[in-house]
Amino acid sequence: MGCVPLFQFLLLSVYDRTMNFKIDLHVHTKFSGDNYTEPEETVINAIQRNLQGIVFTEHYSYEASEHAESLKEKYRNEIMIFRGVEFSAAEGHCLIFGVNTDKLSMSHAPIEDIVRIVSESGGIVIPSHPFRGGTGIGSIVEKIKGFTAIEGYNGYSHHSQNMKAIEAAKILNLPFTGGSDAHEPGEVGACYTECYEEVTIDNFLTVLKAGNYQGVDTRKVSKAWVF
Ligand SMILES: [Zn+2]
Ligand SMILES: [Zn+2]
């Protein structure tokens, strides 16, 4: 039994490879245009909730999350900050990761076309709150091929709507994610995705594609948008 060198000990304490990684895959700020949240407040709340990562998914535009770049650097030793987008397909909302959607011409295109275009560009599509009336894509979710996962736990959906989404994921044999859909800083982490492998800034997309994760709902009461 030798001594563990100090630097190795410090590395182990920061990056415990046996731990699960908690990532909130669905977070909005004032750059979504429907709230007043300062991104940095959300980051601070996420650190306090012991999340290892968050993804800013502003409405409709990837470039709307440009604010994440400076925060990513500033907080790089405390939390991983990623960028995605919550896009509007003709049928409803979906989360898109790994591509700049502003550079792809697919505004309000059918979800089937969006999946094809994003996949061809190397990105992935995860329908968000599919069974929330008005903005979810609904039962068509079970007919579309090419989703990477289904958002199972959404912090702004009723438990019953989330259960339907998880059921759809099972039917499709896909993993399900969790995301708070936070529109206020204190809401971040209400739902999140627990990854059972190490997540880094560089392997995020690979981890999402691999499917070794599950959504988690920490809410005592499921609040929801009313439709
Ligand atoms: Zn949405
Ligand atoms: Zn959202």
Image (spheres, helix red, strand yellow):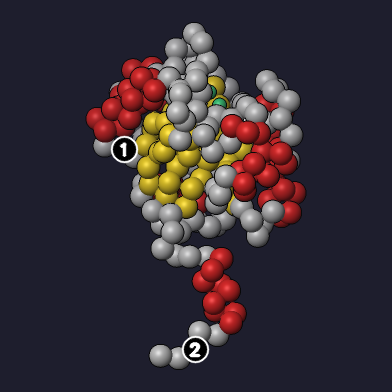
Which label number is shown at residue 30?
none
On the image, numbered disc 2 is attached to which residue?
Answer: 3
> Height in image: 20 above or below 45?
below
Question: Is ligand 2 within 8 Å of the beta carbon of the residue shown at mark 2?
Answer: no
For label 2, the crowd category at 10 Å Cα-Cα, with few meaning under 14, some 14 to 19 and many 20 or more, is: few
> Height in image: 147 above or below 195?
above
Q: Residue at x 50, y 18 (%)?
A: 224
On the image, numbered disc 1 is attached to which residue?
Answer: 174
Q: Nearer the viewer, mark 2 or mark 1?
A: 2
First in sequence: mark 2 or mark 1?
A: 2
Residue closer to the observer: 110 or 134 = 134
Q: Is residue 187 visible?
A: yes
Q: Residue at x 58, y 41 (%)?
A: 55
Q: Secondary structure at mark 2?
A: loop
Residue closer to the observer: 185 or 28 = 185
Q: Is residue 113 visible?
A: no
- Left or right of 74? Residue 54 is left
Q: What amino acid is found at the position of numbered circle 2 in the picture?
A: Cys
Quadrant the N terminus occupies: bottom left
What is the x, y in percent for residue 181?
55, 29
What is the x, y in percent for residue 42?
66, 38
Q: What amino acid is found at the position of numbered circle 1 in the picture?
A: Leu
What is the x, y in percent for residue 135?
49, 16
Q: Residue at x 38, y 46 (%)?
A: 213
